[in-house]
Image (cartoon, helix red, strand yellow):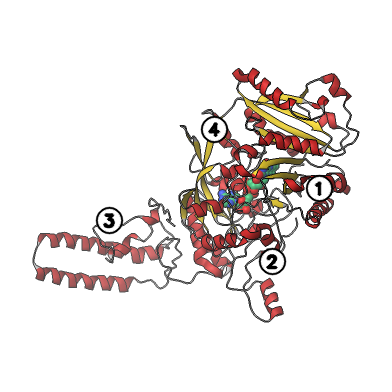
Amino acid sequence: MAIQLYSEHKYMTVPPKTFPLNSPFYLFFFFPQSSTLNLKFTSTFLIPFRLLFFAISLNKVEMGLTSSLRFHRQNNKTFLGIFMILVLSCIPGRTNLCSNHSVSTPKELPPSNPSDIRSSLVSLDLEGYISFDDVHNVAKDFGNRYQLPPLAILHPRSVFDISSMMKHIVHLGSTSNLTVAARGHGHSLQGQALAHQGVVIKMESLRSPDIRIYKGKQPYVDVSGGEIWINILRETLKYGLSPKSWTDYLHLTVGGTLSNAGISGQAFKHGPQINNVYQLEIVTGKGEVVTCSEKRNSELFFSVLGGLGQFGIITRARISLEPAPHMVKWIRVLYSDFSAFSRDQEYLISKEKTFDYVEGFVIINRTDLLNNWRSSFSPNDSTQASRFKSDGKTLYCLEVVKYFNPEEASSMDQETGKLLSELNYIPSTLFSSEVPYIEFLDRVHIAERKLRAKGLWEVPHPWLNLLIPKSSIYQFATEVFNNILTSNNNGPILIYPVNQSKWKKHTSLITPNEDIFYLVAFLPSAVPNSSGKNDLEYLLKQNQRVMNFCAAANLNVKQYLPHYETQKEWKSHFGKRWETFAQRKQAYDPLAILAPGQRIFQKTTGKLSPIQLAKSKATGSPQRYHYASILPKPRTV
Ligand code: FAD
């Protein structure tokens, strides 16, 4: 595999060609210019070296002027003498060499006690900086259930900062427990972006490259892995372009969604976001900076996409674009029969000429229906709509969107009218709205602002996202929506199908083994100090009941944004692909430094942890455990 090391990195300056590689002068160039070497070392060791280099250079000039061999030999002896004296007199008692130099061989054993490790982090020569006092800011995530502070936060300014940090931790090796989590916006749910007592890399500090757009036949945008999707949308719209595949919420980072999949109502057509990437720049778990694509370093490319942050840190991504519409026609219709609802959804995603977005959601036991689900929509027939009564029945709302530009409004109306005429929804429940494209895509942000204002955004979110094969969806819906859930007052339940045939096969994402499967997302918020159905414990038990039912009925369901406690569960999640996943881990992050919060692999350390010690006492032999089965449970907030 070709590794792309950046030659402009100041530590990788190539020596002038006039000196052969085996020359002692070569060493001179490998000492960092501004450096992690301490002042004492620099003044006592480096300066005489440079004087010597200067003298020898003069000597070389002089040698060029005379062709006498005798003079040459005498001169060489003199300079060898000076060289030895200088070297011997200048060797410092302790060099305190703590280099992140990418090619030097470390002279000392890496530090192993916590305060030395901390000072070794401080001594890294970075364009950005490391902080220790604000670690509480990255100790939690959107799920808001665990609090696991890191030792330090890296605020990188460049890919080299990230590479230097990784190399430094690799150099520390198994003497330290340090792990690394790239943190996008921390919108994970179960601590996936946390690194307890490790280093959290705040990806939003990585502002390079800027958002760069390339027009042409196959337009694309180059962005930093820490960029958020709403900024990419705003910037690409200036050129009349837009990414093709989205998530429902755009204040998520490129690195964060590409590590999972990035699924929304466009995924049936374009695949998830991981389908729409041309190229990535990755810092692997070994600290190597690698550019990869489907054709170049393809194994790493496919590993990282959907790879749960296990193989490398996405520092840059090239994302494909398409012409952006100005407006969308946004339509909602209701069904009381699940079969009719899912049949229509599947029909729409199977057609060539269809809507641009297909989603849906479940409404359970909602009496305030007409005030809520269609708040910014107008009824097609207001008299009929006012007569509609939900009677507390479970209803299914199909949500579809057609993109258009103002001059295409009438043909768009005809097309949507034709598509709607082929569906079997309750006629009085057709509601629609026309809004700018950006307003539609950024819709969840409006809800976020409202919830923040009420103090209801930063509450625990016991979300559960499942991918359910088409063959199981009816059984799932019948049991879960009618018997297990009795209301969805505390959050939406999304449900929509996608075509796997349009999704790329070799990524790390695990999906059910059928061409059509559904995303079902339970998205409740637990209200603090409440009891009953809004209580965290109640909601967690409800999730468990759903999972137990899926297991007992053998529905072949896979978790999206997966979370497991044990190696056995992870193995079962990956199925036949576990071996490949583990081999890729060994290849790209052999010390298991990356994304510890996913709880799949555990970093191997020289010293046994208390849990390992306990296990080894029980079995009588010291062992190294690598997998989640022995990880401590995250502490609940
Ligand atoms: P983080 O939570 O910070 O990180 C997620 C994981 O990726 C961690 O393991 C982290 O270490 C790793 N990671 C982060 N950055 C990088 C990087 N640059 N390189 C390598 N690894 C990295 N998902 C969907 O698919 N569709 C949706 O419609 C959708 N809607 C959502 C709505 C809301 C309100 C929220 C909170 C989440 C939603 N998500 C959705 C889930 C979202 O995709 C995940 O939370 C994802 O983790 C992105 O969040 P983030 O950028 O904050 O990443």
The span from disc 2 to disc 1 (Cα, nearest Å) is 32 Å
Find residue 36 and report its horizontal and vertical position in percent: 44, 60
Q: Nearer the viewer, residue 479 or 39?
A: 479
The span from disc 4 to disc 2 (Cα, nearest Å) is 44 Å
Residue marked by disc 3? 16
Is the C-beta separation of discs 1 and 4 under 8 Å? no
Please rate how many residues cluster around mark 3, counting C-alpha atoms within 10 Å: few if below 14, some from 14 to 19, many from 20.
few
**Mark 2 or 1, nearer chain start:** 1
**Whether the residue under disc 3 has CB within 8 Å of ligand 1:** no
Image quadrant holding the N terminus, namely: bottom left
Q: Amino acid at mark 3?
A: Pro
Q: Amino acid at mark 2?
A: Ser
Residue marked by disc 1? 475
**Mark 1 or 4, nearer chain start:** 4
**Marks 2, 3: nearer the viewer:** 2
**Mark 2 or 3, nearer chain start:** 3
* Circle 3: element type: loop
Residue marked by disc 2? 629
Residue marked by disc 4? 322
Find residue 501 and report its horizontal and vertical position in percent: 62, 44
Image quadrant holding the C terminus, namely: bottom right
**Mark 3 or 4, nearer chain start:** 3
The span from disc 2 to disc 3 (Cα, nearest Å) is 53 Å
**Marks 3, 4: nearer the viewer:** 4
The span from disc 1 to disc 4 (Cα, nearest Å) is 38 Å
Displayed quadrant of residue 84: bottom left
